[in-house]
Image: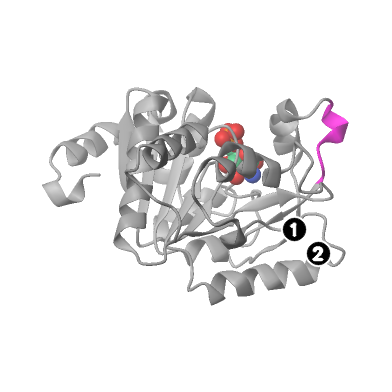
Amino acid sequence: MEILIHDSPEAGAKVAARVVRKIIQTKVNPVLGLATGGTPLRMYKELIKMNHAGELSLQNCTTFNLDEYGGLPPEDKRSYHYYMMSNLFDKIDINKDNVHLPQGNANDLREACREYEKQIKDAGGIDLQVLGIGANGHIGFNEPTGSFASRTWVKILSEQTIQDNSIYFDKLEEVPRHVVTMGIATIMESRHCMLLANGAKKADAIRRMIEGPVSASCPASILQMHQRVTIVLDDEASYLLTFKDHYKWVEKNKLDWQLY
Ligand code: GLP
């Protein structure tokens, strides 16, 4: 795992945006996996800035989002469709025919999940998958103890996640119980994963992901088995790491071509 620790979420977002830019600029038809939640917002702002400054075009990009709430139509302001349109896609030069999100309100959810997997495969797989992490160690909406072999499917949220995500809804009861998410195996097939986390609330999940045993009780810990993972943290999210000084040492001694 490549672990990058920065003083502030703003500094981390800049590095994360440069990782995305590097992938986009080195591939002919880059395929990005994207995430929602509060954490990637700063990175999206950086990408929009680069796009408006003429430093980066996303015209050739195809995107696949990690997850979506069950039952919410795309125009619902709380849906991840709406989030992606308003926070990124409406503000950059991407071709919207090439953006994909799981269909949380499809008539046949199971068929929609199979189709989503097929679309990812047909696009040639994901070059870079952006991830956040839940306070319980979930990635996408893959909750603790879910199978490491899972693929895009309908899942039921844990009570903790419902509680955590209720800040985006008027009432706790409005948070959907069902979601559609890429599975852990889908995420693991991406050629490069980049996980972002900020704040002390994530510190325990970060410790378990990086330094704990690989276990389905912390779904993100499976990333220890991935061949290419970049973790971008602020100081607070990294404060429980035993080998924090080592990660900083490695970063300081990188070769020029290893930097972003
Ligand atoms: C949701 C999303 C995850 C995200 C997590 C953390 O549950 N499904 O993909 O990583 O929230 O969100 P935040 O970045 O707001 O802390």
Tell me if residue 170 can be seen.
yes
Q: Residue at x 75, y 37 (%)?
A: 78
x, y percentage for residue 60?
44, 61
Q: Residue at x 46, y 45 (%)?
A: 209
x, y percentage for residue 158?
74, 43
Q: Residue at x 78, y 72 (%)?
A: 111
Q: Is 249 in front, or is 53?
A: 53
Q: Residues within 10 Å of mark 1 (few under 14, many from 20)?
A: many
Element on which disc 2 rests: helix
Which region is colored magenta?
171-177
Q: Amino acid at mark 1?
A: Gln
Q: Which mark is residue 109?
A: 2
Query: Which label's residue is closer to the chain start, 1 or 2?
Result: 1
Element on which disc 1 rests: loop
Above-or-below relation of 56 to 49: below
Q: Is 135 in front, or is 7?
A: 7
Tell me if residue 135 can be seen.
no
Q: Residues within 10 Å of mark 2 (few under 14, many from 20)?
A: some
Note whether ligand 1 is within 8 Å of mark 2: no
Above-or-below relation of 238 to 90: above
Q: Which circle, 1 or 2, is nearer the viewer? A: 1
Ligand 1 image-quadrant field: top right
Residue topped by disc 1: 103
Q: Is 208 in front, or is 185?
A: 185
* Dots 1, 2 in contact, CB < 8 A: yes
When asked about the image quadrant of residue 233, the answer is: top left
* In-image side of 159 versus 12 (left or right): right
